[in-house]
Amino acid sequence: MATPLAPGWTEHKAPTGHSYFYNNETKKSTYTRPIAQAQAQAPPPAQFIPSYGSGQLAGGFQANQFQQNQYSGPQYQGNQFPAQFPGQPPGPQAYNNGGRGGRGGFRGGRGDSRGGHANHDRRRQEPEDKPKHRYKLPGCDPWVLVKTKLGRRFVHNTDTKESFWKFPEDVMVAVIEYDRREREKKERRERGEPSDVEDEVAVMAEEPTAVAEVEPGRAAIVPVQNNEAAEDSSEYEEIEVTDDEEEAENGEGPSKRQRTDEPDDQPVDFDEDDIAYQLQAMGEDYGLDPGEYGIDEDGTWEEGAEGLPLTEEDSKALFYDLLNDFMINPYTPWEKVVEDGYIIDDDRYLALPNMKARKDCYDEWSREKIQELRERREKEAKKDPKIPYFKLLEEYASVKLYWPEFKRKYRKEGAMRDTKVPDKEKEKLYREHVKRLQLPQNTLKSDLSTMLKAQPLSQLNRSTPIEAIPSAILTDLRYISLPPKIRDPLLEAFISTLPPPPTDGVSAEDQEAEAAKRRERRRREDALAEREARVQNDKRKQQKDLAYGRGKLREEEMELQRAMNVGKDGLRGQLMEQLGEKDERSLVID
Amino acid sequence: MPPIRSARNRKPPPEGFDDIEDTLLEFANKMKDAENATHEGKKRYETVWPIFQITHQRSRYIYDLYYEKEAISRQLYDWLLKNGYGDANLIAKWKKQGYEKLCCLRCIQTKETNFNSTCICRVPKDTMKEQHTIECVSCGCRGCSSSD
């Protein structure tokens, strides 16, 4: 100490190594050394009374939790806080996290508020604090000195489980003693005896510098109140805790202060959280989105972390698009899709956070896609499986080949391998076709024309292109038995003679339906006619029977009548006859 | 003598087989490769692992298509099982609770084991004592119990 400081001023070290001076009352800091003036002000020992820091930490765990909820709940719920104070220094929350309550409370706070980038800001501003080191205090047995991650210190009584930010009197002595020893140790180390710890210290010393550089918005002078401890007892009063937002707004972020102080006092642990924090801070200063630099803490970003908010549906839709764009066959298993790896290189592949989500998404997509395919196929007209076989016949069938020969010769053809047309059917068609090939051409021509004439006008008319002939014609042997050279002109000529298609605006389906109706009607009529014929038959039979019966009756009647018709003359005649016979007999006798 | 049914003169497979034919063919090729793969440097029981694996995958594929995605018809499903594309017994087990991920039937067979118990892969991960990975002897499964 060269010259005594003016009262009210304290000397501090900036992270860059400069020492500067801070007046606690006027809240001013300067690099130039304020020399003692005629100010009759006593150096204030501790202006900042920690609002709740002096509470019992371990015992007051519940209370801490509660306070945190209070803070994180209403205050941070909306977006308004970070909007009002962009680049806002840490709110009180960071300081709730004394002792053991810190971690849980921090998580809880995050869970509470889900608004935009508030989350993100808060994470940046309020790194969680937690106990880091624990030192035994010499000659003060149940008490231990605990150093938190942010470099703050408190004492803890292992027996009574009490913790204090503010050191009790008896403990204070031990702490001072401890500090002295630490300093001695450090000095010894600096003098010689290089150890591996030293390198670490050097690295650590750089860290706060980097932070200070990447955050130029901050006050270049970072006031540290409690650092050089030996002559300034204020350290042992622990001034750091404050709720004052105005001060926070001034950029004297206590967290900042705490993060950067005493880099060379003890080896500060520089762990992954710190790295993540720094990276984040740098990324923000460069105007990057958190998605663009690679820290991933929870596997997913909070909502709104990545530029525009990307909802779950959006990312799902993106993945769907990806699958559609790559023409993935929905029938392939997911493992195969991943194995092929076409989609992996695409950015949209990363829209979903993990593999499970992707698999689920794929399953859903393929399910929908298959459904869609099926519906489309149902709508499509069914193609006759025989058509390719007929083409094959037309091309290769010849009188010179028997069916087994033909079959063997063209077994590799797709139409021959197709199992939709059974083998028997193929054989039958082949034989018939070959038989027809031997017929004279005139017969074939007349057969063709009769076949064409039999086609309904809706199927075959003037506007039918020669390439789109109905399958009823294509799957007819009479069509292929003529060679195309002769057949096609004939067909064209026939088509040109046909009238245009029926223009009543009915579609093919309607016509189909109508045809079905007509068929039905004809069937009914036929049935009716048949029935009538049968009835007529029956009637005729009946009448015949009747007539026969009548005739018979008449005959019988006549017979009866004849029998009844016994007249006198009949009897007499009989008698006469008998008499005459007698006479004759007598005459003969006589 | 019964008529010989070759691929040519058999009845055509049910509708929808064309869609999955390629995938099944791939499985068949994989299976052929696995069958013909060299056994050198492998333990005796290890040689059959890929066979089991492919069988499982193929059965799973058919199971998913029919039960999860409803992409194939009942006729086709039955036809596939009848023609040995999937293992009907394994699929039957998958329908039971606790067996949704069962790797193979041998792993739940208690008869032929030393302690009359199921395979090690049926033990839930959280109840396993040591945390190192396991591979069961019968099919190389690393744990298929549904509780984990």
Image (spheres, rainbow, N blue to C red):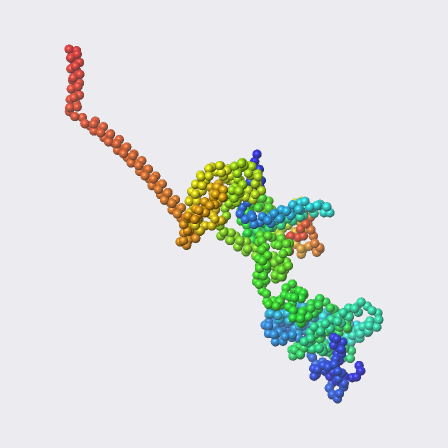
Of the 4 image quadrants, the one containing the C terminus of chain B is bottom right
Inspect this view and state whether residue A364 appears: no
A376 left or right, relative to A188: left
In the figure, A246 relative to A550: above or below?
A: below
Q: Residue at x 30, y 36 (%)?
A: A540
Q: Quadrant of the N terminus of chain B?
A: top right
Q: In the drawing, does residue A504 fall left or right of residue A250?
A: left
Name the residue: 41% across, 48% down. Answer: A498
Q: Is residue A263 visible?
A: yes
Q: Residue at x 78, y 74 (%)?
A: A179
A94 vs A520, nearest the viewer: A520
x then y, percent, for residue B104: 64, 48
Q: Position of residue B98 (x, y in %)?
A: 61, 52
Q: Nearer the viewer, residue A509 or A496?
A: A496
Direction bottom: furthest residue: A38
Is residue B98 shown above or below A77?
above
Number of numbered discs overlaid on the protein picture? 0
Figure quadrant of residue B9: top right
Counting from the top left corner in percent of width and height, residue A11 is at 75, 80
Query: Which residue is the extreme one toward the top?
Result: A590
Residue at image coords 84%, 69%: A193
Of the pair A74 and A172, the residue shown nearer to us: A74
Residue A357 image position (x, y, % from top left): 61, 59
Please give left or right for residue A546 compared with residue A226 in the image: left
Q: For this rendering, which residue is in front, A566 or B123?
A: A566
- Vertical side of A123 occupied by A27: above or below: below
